[in-house]
Image: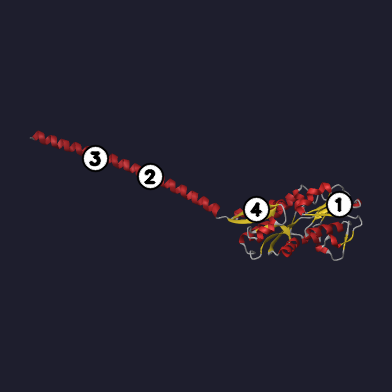
Amino acid sequence: MKKALALILTASLLTGVLTACGSSEAQTDAAETTTEEAAAEETAAAEETADTDAQAETGDLQVITVAATAVPHAEILEAAKPILAEQGYDLQVTVFDDYVQPNEVVEAGDIDCNYFQHIPYLNSYNEERGTHLVSVGEIHYEPIGIYAGTESDLSNISDGADIAIPNDTTNEARALLILQDNGIITLKEGAGIDATINDIAENPHNINFVEMEAAQVSKVLSEVAFAVINGNYALDAGLNAQTDALASETSDSLAAQTYVNVVVVKEGNEDNEGVKALVNVLKSDDIKKFIEETYEGAVVPFEG
């Protein structure tokens, strides 16, 4: 009887020991599992936070859209991009190769602003097309120049020579004024910045004026005696008004001051914060320095 009781007690003790060991291992396994799950959750949370921060960093940038011609406007805008990014703006530039579409997309509300034209052209465009575009910032001017084509001496121009000039109202007047300044023609008194070929009073060399869209003038340089080319299109063709032109507008001339290039918006959008920031950057010392060093006088920051 005592033996049987001893065996029962021994069995109970063994069972208790085994149970205690099993419980300890289970608890250890559970603790390890809990720790691993917690670590995984922490990693996932950290990754999610990083993703959220990255999205916030890019998603918080306010987009500014601008239409521009390639040279120098789009190049200047590219220089402004990193400065604007530091201020919380993402500048997106759409490049056009004419003087019409950049105004059309702003008038339609597809793009916030444009940067390619001067005030006389803007006023003429609004009058002719019934648009509602306004300037919000004067940035730079580009001296227009007379460039050699098949001839190279303005003082010995041949009779009946062809001279290519822009055909839009304001740039044609500008071309005629610089030709007058160089003794090639004489305009009627008071013709000024509204002059057309109909305002030519004297044409002693019987010049034949080849009128065409401003962007096309540089492309016919080899086919005409001379061409009067806008500064941006001259640059686009690898020409510099200060070094390559036979004659160009001087920095203190009325024309240079009149034809300052501006940032333009549709009327009613003058208080767009993004556009205001863009204008401030374009008028900053950093961008002035970029213009002066990059274009060496072919593009001049406007002071005013």
Task: Find residue 257 and report its image quarter.
Answer: bottom right
Q: Which colour scheme is used?
A: secondary structure
**Real-space Cα separation, disc 2 to disc 1, in angstroms:** 84 Å
Q: Which of marks 4 and 2 is in front?
A: 4
Q: Name the residue under label 3.
A: 20
Q: Could you tell which of marks 4 and 1 lies nearer the N-terminus? A: 4
Residue depicted at x 78% and y 48%: 219
> Residue 181: x percent and y percent?
86, 58
> 263 or 227: nearer the eye?
227
Look at mark 2 in the image and give the residue it sits on: 37
**Rendered location of residue 272, percent (x, y):** 62, 62
Where is residue 228 drawn, in percent x and y? 82, 53
Q: Distance between the residues labelled 4 and 2?
A: 48 Å
Nearer to us in this view, 156 or 140: 156
Nearer to us of marks 4 and 1 is 1
Q: Position of residue 214 (x, y in %)?
A: 77, 54
Are there few (<14), some (14-19), or many (20+) residues within 10 Å of tag 4? many
Instruction: Report which residue position mark 1 lands on.
Output: 162
Spatial CA distance of label 3 from label 2 is: 26 Å
Q: Which amino acid does label 4 sit on?
A: Val
Mark 4 vs mark 1, CA separation in Å = 37 Å
Say whether disc 2 or disc 1 marks the residue closer to the N-terminus. Answer: 2
Point out the residue furthest to the left here: 1
Quadrant housing the C terminus? bottom right
